[in-house]
Image (cartoon, helix red, strand yellow):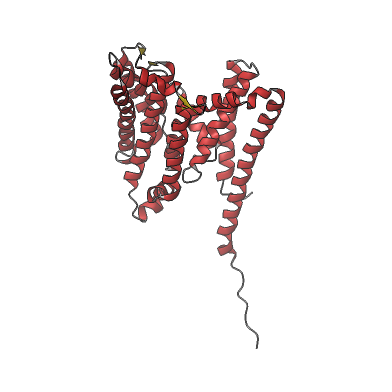
Amino acid sequence: MSTAQPSPNPDAAAPAVRRNAWFNRQRLASLVVWIAFACYVIPLAIAQPQFISFYNIISILMLISVYALIGFGEGVVVLSGGIDLSVGSIVGLAGVVAAVILTGHSGVGWCLIAIAGGVFAGVLIGVFNGIAVALLNIPSFVATLGTLSIALGIGYVFSAGQQISIDNDPFLNISINAYFGIPIPIYIMFIVFLLLWLVLAKTRFGRYIYAVGGNIQAAFVAGLPIRRVLISAFVISGGLSGLAGVLLAAQITAGIASTGSGYELTAIAAPVIGGISLAGGRGSIAGALFGVILLGTIDNGLTILNVSPFYQHIIRGFIIILAVLLDTIASRRKLV
């Protein structure tokens, strides 16, 4: 007696094939980035041994600490399927708010109030962005482009178009004090990274971020709180940009409304370079950290090689284009 063998179902196998193809493309794109990074770092380390010295590594980490905080927040927004162009203006606004609070005041208490004020300013802009996107259904690109100008304008109004010097010692010590040779902003950067990684990888909210960014229609059908998730993502981005603005103000000892202009480009580029898809729902916050380290390492290496800042801008632009190209390749669904 013979038993009939079920014939393979090509339609059932097709989704698996597409998933494997996408997985392979994503791995290939990530591998290209790592190889390019190694091809840059290894020869430079051989030619310029000071490039891998402890002092220079700390300098790189200190340089990227502000960019990393902005990139982490931007990474959360991109994972949720949006984009936040207002982060640079929030950095400047937060620094101005902190400087205004500290004017004529000294002591640790006012330092803490200034930090809270700068972060709160970022959170308020984040709430505004979230409401515009989640409740008013304005595309995130348009909404945050508007708040980019709004936050910058508020910063100019608060500062009367001038830089506001800061002479509060506890506040300035945030960028000066170091423990075991490592400045405080670097500790803050890694603490924020660890907290965000735990939230995104281990909590329900993290799963919601990926679900909304991966397929918002499916998330709606599943009954997920889409509006709250989107608003929360922008609040996180705004708050971290505010914190970055506070740290930057401590480093430059002043609040300047325009100090964060252009930071949004690095904030968007870093997560994409690190493997977070612009389409949303794919990637890890660790990718944002890797992306900002890569960009900071490249900038530092080019400076050591005495490359003109003008050429550095050109190189950074090509890196951003390459990152988006690799993201497009990794996200492409059609088999070729």
Residue 217 x %, y %: 39, 51
- Of 34 and 138, the residue lying toward us: 34
The image quadrant of residue 115 is top left
**Residue placed most toward the observer, 262 or 285:** 285
**11 w.r.t. 129: above or below:** below
- Asked whether the viewer can see residue 71, the reply is no
Q: Position of residue 54 (x, y in %)?
A: 59, 27
Residue 160, compared with residue 215, is above or below; it is above
User: Quick check: 311 above or below 207?
Assistant: above
Quarter of the image containing the N terminus? Answer: bottom right
Outermost residue, front side: 180
Q: Give the side of residue 179 with respect to residue 311, left or right.
A: left
Q: Measuring from the top left, give residue 73's x and y in whole percent.
A: 42, 35
The residue most toward the bottom is: 1
Residue at 36% x, 55% y is: 221
Residue at 50%, 36% (x, y): give it: 288
Q: Residue at x 59, y 39 (%)?
A: 326
Query: Residue 102: x percent and y percent?
Result: 30, 18
Q: Quadrant of residue 248?
A: top left
Total number of numbered discs in the rendering: 0
305, 27: nearer the viewer: 305
Q: Is residue 4 above or below residue 91?
A: below
Q: Is residue 67 left or right of residue 146?
A: right
Residue 44 appears in view: yes
